[in-house]
Amino acid sequence: MEKRAVFKSWWLPVLFALPQLVLILLFFYWPVAAVVNWAFTLEPPFGGAAEFVGFANFKEALSDPFYWNSVVVSLIFATVGPFFCIFIGLTLALAVDRQLPGSGFFRFFYILPFAIAGPAAGMAFRFILSPERGLAASINALSPDLWNPAKYGSHALALVIIIFIWKWSGYTFIFLLAGLQSVPRALGEAAAMDGAGPFRRAIDVQVPLLAPTLFFLLVTMMTEGFVGADTFGIVHSVTGGGPNHGTEVMVYRIVDEAFQGLNYSGASAQSIILIGLIMVFTFIQFRFIEKRVHYK
Amino acid sequence: MIQRTPYADAFTYAIMVIGFLLLLGPFLVVLAGASQTMPQVNAVPFSFLPQGEFMKNASAAWARADLGTAMTNSLIMAALVTAGKVALSACTAFAIVFFRTPLKHVFFWSVFITLMLPLEVRVVPTYAVAADLFQPIKSILGFFGLEIGIEWNLLNSYAGLTLPLIATATGTFLYRQFFMTLPDELAEAARMDGSGSVRFFFDMLLPLSRTNMLALTTIMFVYGWNQYLWPLLMVTDPSYKTLMMSLLALLPSDNGIPDWNVTLAGSLIIMAPPVIVVAVLQRWFVRGLVSSEK
Amino acid sequence: MADIQIRAVRKSYGKTPTLHGIDLSFDSGEFVVILGPSGCGKSTLLRMIAGLEDITAGEIAIDGRVVNKLEPRERGCAMVFQNYALYPHMTVAGNIGYALKVAGVAKAERERRIAETAKIVGLQDYLERRPAALSGGQRQRVAMARAIIREPKVFLFDEPLSNLDAKLRVTMRAEIRKLHQRLSATSVFVTHDQVEAMTLADRLVVMNRGHVEQVGRPLDIYHRPASTFVASFIGAPAMNLFTTRIEVETATVRLDGAAIAIDPLVAHALRGREVIVGIRPEQCRLTTEGKGLPARIDFVEELGVGRVIHCEIAGEAFAAAVAEDADVSAGDTVWLSLPPEQLHFFDAETGRRIEFPLPGTDIAAARGSASTTQHTGVLS
Ligand SMILES: Nc1ncnc2c1ncn2[C@@H]1O[C@H](COP(=O)(O)OP(=O)(O)O)[C@@H](O)[C@H]1O
Ligand SMILES: [Mg+2]
């Protein structure tokens, strides 16, 4: 139910909300409007007013094979990454939720990677998974270049996805554990009375009840994979989009196109497509997945 | 519940230990590498044993990437983002929850929408606004054929580093959630006692929100500290550099010596503050994360 | 002290009307209880007096001054809420003294008054505690103290006792009553509990579905309920009610196979009308076999001070209160007499009470026509 709003002044709420609204207007709504504007106009190279060019910027973007490459890279990144994040988070949450002695210790550490910035984690992994050292060196000893992210785009993509998974598994873990803990204990006990062992209980009782949380995480993580700050940060600091455009995710390409290529109109058109894509994803997820989700 | 499930328990521990190794392993590698000498860090196979070289490596990293200045700037930036967020979003949530005005829905939705589109997809025009704060007004006036000559550039300033990051919804929703759980009668009792809305905000809401503020502080500190793209664009003056921007400067140069021990020591310095915050205030951090989502 | 006038007050939430024109007038110093089932609009009315809710139409005056547009703090009312609404982050002293702090009363004076008020409600030893560390009864006292300290013209109580256990409720009831005698400010007390209402009220207002059903002294309402709603809402067990028709010739009402004698005057007045007849369980008497109304007992409720027989008559549940030593048990058939002067009559359509004599009745003629056919007893 709506809260009974208590105070009646009309100007006080405006005054209270104003600081944040002004900031949002300046740094959110105006820029978003500008993105839309730029996507449909083109600024002549040597000054002068921007001209309306309809969908020309979109056509140009869509006819660029590198653009399509970035779409494919982003799709892989934003499906594989979230899948593993949720899988790992769920497995660990189910384990910790059994509340065996010592599980508090593990829980404490599982959350820590999430505190690290994507680029900083990237720096560590550049060392950990570099082809010349440690684990990877032993693999490459079998046959040269079995693992070489500096040379192969697919290896580099795997590397950035691994970093993403490493960082974000703790996040899904937090939410899934919170979700599990809100499942009434009595349910598990009832299932135990029905003779279900721990595994059966996990599959039959706990996971179905987690459906809303899983659904929420799916939407959040995929959005994060497509446009999250870490997605950009990891790619920028680890591979710079390479080798050979192999890790050029859509956000990276947009920023690169704008600030290296100085092609604001093209970047804006790509932004609009990305925004549209996210909305479609969110819509599909709400429409088709939410139906099979059991809310309380 | 009394249960004897030795196999399931053993399996559970196995999973927890594997998870521990996967998630903590990279930390251990960084810790070990940061405390080794250059030959040790490049040895195959890699030794996970920490050595005694950390301070030396750290000071080398400190000098190489000028981490002192960057550390100060990162601290200032994270503190400003946190303080701004904690203060402003409390005010907005108050306006949204406690007033009987049709505007509250306008406020709510205009703040809510900002969750949808992260900085990365609107970064160019946001940068343009930061480069000239009055650009929106100028454009609107320009539309009517007017021109004004004022300009206010936020590039290379703390305001420019932080204000656009404060303009998002996270904290507002955390407060809103909390305010919604307060019984209506609390505000009514205060009103009967003669307190007006502003007084209610300061006497009741703020003291009651202390735990939520702590939760918000932890997540906003981590958020502010870990900003990467925005400082990269905003800052050209080295005296405003943040730690995240120094990361790439820590890398061993391509044809130079592979002194990864120094790089790792530097990365460790950069990673440490948010990790410490999350480790010490984990309860609040988790609470902030969970309750700032819808 | 102040009197309260409520004139043609209406309240709608959006398009849904909640109160349909309330007219009430409370005297200065009176203890008024508003009684009604939950959802009937009691709280809404109280909150309009307090200034927490807008008045859709009509006006409310306190002490002769129309307060429709005044802020709560300008009305001189104090309120005790059902969930107490204590400030969780303040100590007991902080809670009690908050109104004075807002009003800018100096610290020393404030502390003196806090101590004084705490003593009245017996909280002097708990001043430094937080509400979370208090029992339900103590929290209730803090809420009361918070109201008392302001020395308001009007006390408003919104079901303040319903979160307490039964025993504490009785104690607090007595304390509230004592407090009222001591402070003698006008008090308006809302409750859905009829025992609470009967014991506390100088004057009782019974509400139902946004209407006032009856206003009066508790005993008057008990003895002369103005409608079937009031009749069944007040008194426990509830009044027995039957829809039936009067037989003028025999001056009886028929129930099942039995006929109950009524006053011939009444019978005459009500001839041809469909009515609802009511009798309170405490007015039914056990009588000897063959007299009155036969009833087979379904079960017997033991109250200690007496017993209540539950049975079924004319397809309706029927209760009768009997002495605790009455020899009754489930399965028995007993004979009940229903004294004619204890019967209540209500219009079957409107449910309103029918008062006697009806206006325009020719009493002599009525007596004449009725006396010829006076019979009582069971028709075989
Ligand atoms: N803020 C509100 N918005 C809409 N309807 C309300 C509101 N408050 C109360 N009502 C409705 O008004 C009616 C009377 O409520 P209330 O005065 O609280 O009853 P009660 O007699 O139980 O105290 C109820 O049907 C309730 O649903
Ligand atoms: Mg009520």
Image: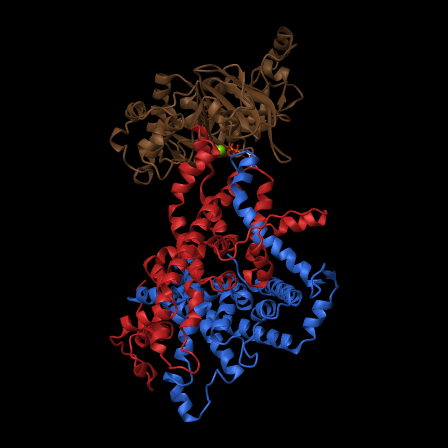
Residue C14 lies, in percent from the top left, at 62, 36
Q: How many marks are shown on the rendered structure?
A: 0
Q: Which chain is blue?
A: A
Image colour for chain C is brown
Horizontal relation, residue C175 to residue B131: left or right: left
Ligand number 1: quarter of image: top right
Colour pattern? by chain
Name the residue rendered at 48%, 34% in the picture.
B197
Q: Which chain is red?
A: B
Residue C73 lies, in percent from the top left, at 46, 25
Residue B254 lies, in percent from the top left, at 44, 81
Horizontal relation, residue A193 to residue A263: left or right: left
Name the residue rendered at 54%, 73% in the picture.
A77
Q: Quadrant of residue A255?
A: bottom right
Query: Is any part of residue C330 visible from this angle?
Result: no
Q: Residue furthest bottom?
A: A143
Q: Is residue A110 above or below residue C141?
A: below
Q: In the depicted view, which residue is nearer to us: A16 or C111?
A: A16
Query: Is any part of residue B196 visible from this angle?
Result: yes
Q: In the depicted view, which residue is nearer to us: C293 or B50?
A: B50
Q: Quadrant of residue B104?
A: top right
Q: Is residue C291 above or below residue A193?
A: above
Horizontal relation, residue B97 to residue A288: left or right: left
Q: Quadrant of the N terminus of chain A?
A: top right
Name the residue rendered at 65%, 19% in the picture.
C271
Horizontal relation, residue A113 to residue C113: left or right: right
Residue B179 lies, in percent from the top left, at 46, 44
Q: Residue furthest top?
A: C364
Q: Quadrant of residue C276?
A: top right
